[in-house]
């Protein structure tokens, strides 16, 4: 089967990366700088660039919203217990897609079609209405109403988790997609 | 409270990034190149570098192992349904930490202590034995026995998910940490 343009481009970029791989083959498995970042999958975010990470430095966990889901916490537990990270950052960002819909909205859209929806000033709309699934009713999409709140809630959820050591500092930040700046979200504790 | 060295370094690196942010403030929310990568949180992996991504190009989802957890699939569903990605890569890697333990091992370690364990030729060992939690019995840590199998299973789990559109190609790869190379895992289907 012939490869798509994107598939070819990714393999082409990878071939270039391999050419200049240098001594990165020497890097150890545990993160050298002993910290982890939990952030959003958003395409505009490059945590290695915005937080100054070289290969080997830090764990990076990403999902829709940068939320402290059970799976993100699974990853953080492994990160500390077996791989020695000692400080964690939770970083959400301005203009996040997770602020643009609710569980109801995406569940209703998916119930009628799995294909990509469109959005305009009237809201989200399916472009076709066939082949949907009611399974979405069972998924919590972890949408965001307010960024300070989502960061604070996620920091607290991590800190209060029974499998998270109490001496791990968890910092909360919002990344501003208009400037690249990390803005601290003070934690109440 | 004074900031740790890591905390200061991250903010310092971010200040440098902001200085050279340029026209990235113009980037649109949906990924310009309309694809997503699911890969491991491992510190040695930089998907932007190994797959040639600029800010704005593609969604990047990362967790311990790069596993197709429910949360990773939540993220992929949002990525396609609302933000228009059309192709997905699942990329695990050689020398993955997830190959070095089992659910039993980490559950037993956490039962006695939440602090970082050590490892040698005899296996994992707690350095202290207090403050553990049996909660780990309820967590599936999604460890890996064989990389080809984990990639294939995760590709199949995604493709067969009731909320994933059938026309999305899902490519399976293993990243070689010794060379930086992406090695294809042929899919049976």
Image: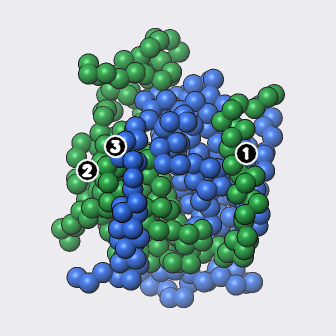
Chain colours: A blue, B green
- Nearest to the observer: residue A61 or residue A164: A61
The reply, left or right, for residue B91 in relation to residue B127 is: left
Label ID, residue B11 = 1
**Residue A151 at x, y percent in the picture:** 71, 47
**Residue B32 at x, y percent in the picture:** 56, 78
Q: CA distance from mark 1 to mark 3?
A: 29 Å
Residue at 35 percent across and 68 percent down: it is A15
Q: Is residue A126 visible from the viewing direction of this image?
A: yes
- Location of mark 2 (residue): B147
Residue at 32 percent across and 60 percent down: it is B181
Q: CA distance from mark 2 to mark 3?
A: 9 Å
**Nearest-to-viewer mark from 1 and 3:** 1
Disc 1 and disc 3 on one polypeptide chain: yes
Quarter of the rendering containing residue B109: top left
Element class at badge 3 = loop
Quadrant that contains the N terminus of chain B: top right
| Chain letter of disc 3 in the image | B
- Nearest to the observer: residue B125 or residue A35: A35
Q: Residues within 10 Å of mark 2 (few under 14, many from 20)?
A: many
Marks 2,3: beta carbons within 8 A? yes
Q: CA distance from mark 2 to mark 1?
A: 36 Å
Q: Residues within 10 Å of mark 1 (few under 14, many from 20)?
A: some
């Amino acid at each position: 089967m012939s490869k798509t343009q994107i598939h070819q481009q990714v393999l082409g970029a990878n071939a270039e990366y391999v050419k200049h791989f240098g001594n990165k083959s020497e890097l150890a498995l545990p993160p050298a700088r002993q910290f982890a970042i939990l952030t959003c999958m958003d395409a505009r975010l490059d945590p290695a660039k915005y937080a100054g990470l070289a290969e080997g430095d830090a764990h990076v966990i990403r999902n829709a919203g940068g939320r402290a889901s059970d799976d993100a916490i699974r990853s953080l537990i492994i990160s500390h217990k077996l791989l020695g990270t000692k400080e964690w950052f939770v970083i959400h960002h301005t203009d996040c897609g997770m602020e643009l819909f609710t569980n109801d909205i995406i569940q209703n859209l998916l119930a009628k079609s799995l294909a990509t929806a469109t959005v305009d000033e009237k809201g989200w709309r399916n472009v076709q209405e066939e082949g949907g699934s009611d399974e979405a009713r069972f998924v919590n999409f972890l949408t965001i109403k307010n960024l300070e709140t989502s960061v604070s809630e996620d920091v607290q959820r991590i800190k209060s988790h029974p499998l998270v050591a109490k001496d791990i500092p968890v910092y909360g930040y919002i990344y501003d997609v208009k400037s690249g700046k990390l803005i601290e979200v003070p934690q109440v504790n």
